[in-house]
Image (tube, grey):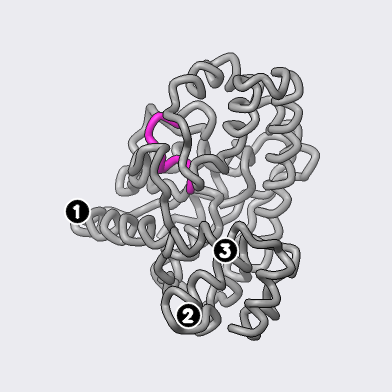
Amino acid sequence: MGPTASGKSALAVAIAERRPDLELVSIDSMQVYRGMDVGTAKDTEHPHHLVDLADPSEDFSVARFQAAAAAALAQIESRGRRALLVGGTGLYLQAVVDGLNVPGAWPELRAELEQQPPADLYRRLQAADPAAAARIDPANARRSARALEVTIGSGRPFSSYGPGVGAFPAAPRFRLAGVWLSRSVVNARIEARYHAQLEAGFLDEVARLPSPLSRTAAQALGYRELLAHRAGSLTLEQALAEAIKRTRAFARRQRMWFRRDPRITWFGAGANPVVLLPALLGNWSS
């Protein structure tokens, strides 16, 4: 695991090529979508489990991913092989590693709640589930709406669904390794990747997507900006600048998420993450 553009996917492929008992499992919330390949940096040359699970017009949930991951891991183990999970979606990773008790979804209720001002949502959450409200930034309307959706829809407080993502129990089935590059290196790699993706046909891929995208697919980095460019509201240069800015902010949030997990062994490199391969191979020596 690690922030986007840190080179973890290429390193995972290199490990799997040297360890024939391993099968690659993608832990990426956007690579689940069919037809979203270039912009999600999907590896189409090496087989990965948990990619291409849904159409971009479908909403995709953590619970659905968790069920698909459980089935994939069971299949891998039934063949006497081992899974190598690779990705940067922290919530999806923890859902698999820690078996989070993921609440259900009530889309119509969620849509209604998301129309309300953030302050009103937060006040309602404070009244309905004070414990959940205490863990949420009042300005984070999306999280407040989700907590209220679960509280109202399920009839039980959102905070009652186990220790949640802030707890890090032992994970005996998994060994966790993180790829760490400096922020400046990751920022440069993000920009370089976008230029390479545009040359590889990112714009054409966006043009082929169904309209509208689902609420979850529409959050994909780069896609929102290029769709705005196609709609005429941004020039290509503006869209690229916005995509780079949003992706760098996302990488910062990924770092913060993963740094909280004391179970991760971090492997740091300078400019080239390939130098980490021997150390990572040693981490899977048993």
Q: CA distance from mark 2 to mark 1?
A: 33 Å
Residue under pointer 2: 161
Mark nearest the camera among 2 and 1 is 2
Residue under pointer 1: 79
Within 10 Å of disc 1 (Cα), the crowding (few <14, some 14-19, many 20+) is: few
Q: CA distance from mark 3 to mark 2?
A: 20 Å
Image quadrant occupied by the C terminus: bottom left
Rendered location of residue 13, percent (x, y): 44, 38
Q: Amino acid at mark 1?
A: Arg
* Residues marked 3 and 2 touching at CB (< 8 Å): no
Q: Is residue 18 visible?
A: no
Q: CA distance from mark 1 to mark 3?
A: 45 Å
Residue 139 in which image quadrant: bottom right
Nearest to N terminus: mark 3 or mark 2: 3
191 relative position to 44: left or right? right
Disc on res. 113: 3
Question: Which residue appears at 54% of the width and 52% of the height?
Answer: 89
